[in-house]
Image (cartoon, helix red, strand yellow):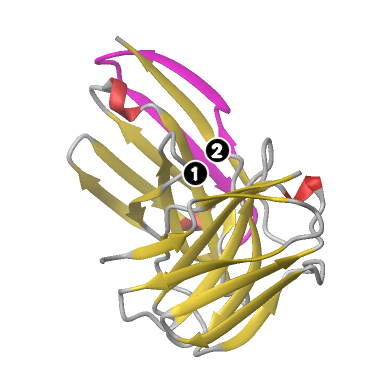
Amino acid sequence: ETGVTQTPRHLVMGMTNKKSLKCEQHLGHNAMYWYKQSAKKPLELMFVYSLEERVENNSVPSRFSPECPNSSHLFLHLHTLQPEDSALYLCASSQDISFLAGEQFFGPGTRLTVL
Amino acid sequence: GIQVEQSPPDLILQEGANSTLRCNFSDSVNNLQWFHQNPWGQLINLFYIPSGTKQNGRLSATTVATERYSLLYISSSQTTDSGVYFCAVENTGRRALTFGSGTRLQVQP
């Protein structure tokens, strides 16, 4: 595998379910990101991890819980979501140098539908 | 926070035509990227261009950081160029990208 991979590619869940999105980067980067793309809205940053430490949390509801066990893997744990959380969730990585994110590379996304 | 505006929001071209997409931003930036989002949602890196001019085949981009804008040129457009083009910037103090709303391009045969 090369680049940034995400699983699953599609997910349908009920509001009471718990699920997790997984992202893996094979680029040797030290920073990883979650973005959300809703219909009719620009991509929004959710979380930033640099060297496995969360450095930015963009006022995201607590029903979204990120986890970064190492610099190659990033998870987004989901629980008690709402239908308005249906969106494309994109993971990205970059080589963070001197507190600058640098060029970011994106995975293919997980298209989430909450029923 | 920084504002990123893209124009035009929608563009329809005949195959073979040229086009210019514009990105204006409201503050100084450390990083500017252009992406093409394909119909399946994948964001494909086109250019990493905080300043200056770059070319890659039929595509080229210019960023004039002092005047806070960037331009993406598409020459001899093809139907496979269809999709949404995003400009995204990173400004000082924020280690992530802020995206514009995109330009939706449709190239007709």
Q: Quadrant of the N terminus of chain B?
A: bottom right
Crowdedness of circle 2 by 10 Å Cα count: few (<14), some, many (20+)? many
- Which one is earlier in the sequence, the residue at label 2 or at label 1? 1
Under mark 2, the amino acid is Gly
Q: Secondary structure at mark 2?
A: loop
**Residue B51 pos. (x, y %):** 38, 59
B31 shown above or below B79: below
Q: Quadrant of the C terminus of chain B?
A: top left
Crowdedness of circle 1 by 10 Å Cα count: few (<14), some, many (20+)? many
Q: Is residue B73 visible?
A: yes
**Residue A97 pos. (x, y %):** 42, 85
Q: Are marks 2 and 1 in contact (CB under 8 Å)?
A: yes
Pick the residue in front: B109 or B52.
B109
In the rendered view, does A106 fall on the left or right side of B47?
right
**Residue A71 pos. (x, y %):** 44, 85
Q: Residue furthest left?
A: B57
- The residue to which callout 1 is attached is B86
Pick the residue in front: A24 or A98.
A24
In the rendered view, does A108 fall on the left or right side of B89?
left
**Residue A25 pos. (x, y %):** 38, 72
Magenta segment includes B24: yes
Q: Which residue shows up at 79% across the image and 46% down it?
A: A84
Which chain letter matches label 1?
B
Residue B102's tag is: 2
Under mark 1, the amino acid is Phe
In the rendered view, does B70 fall on the left or right side of B19?
right
The overriding secondary structure of the stretch rendered in magenta is strand
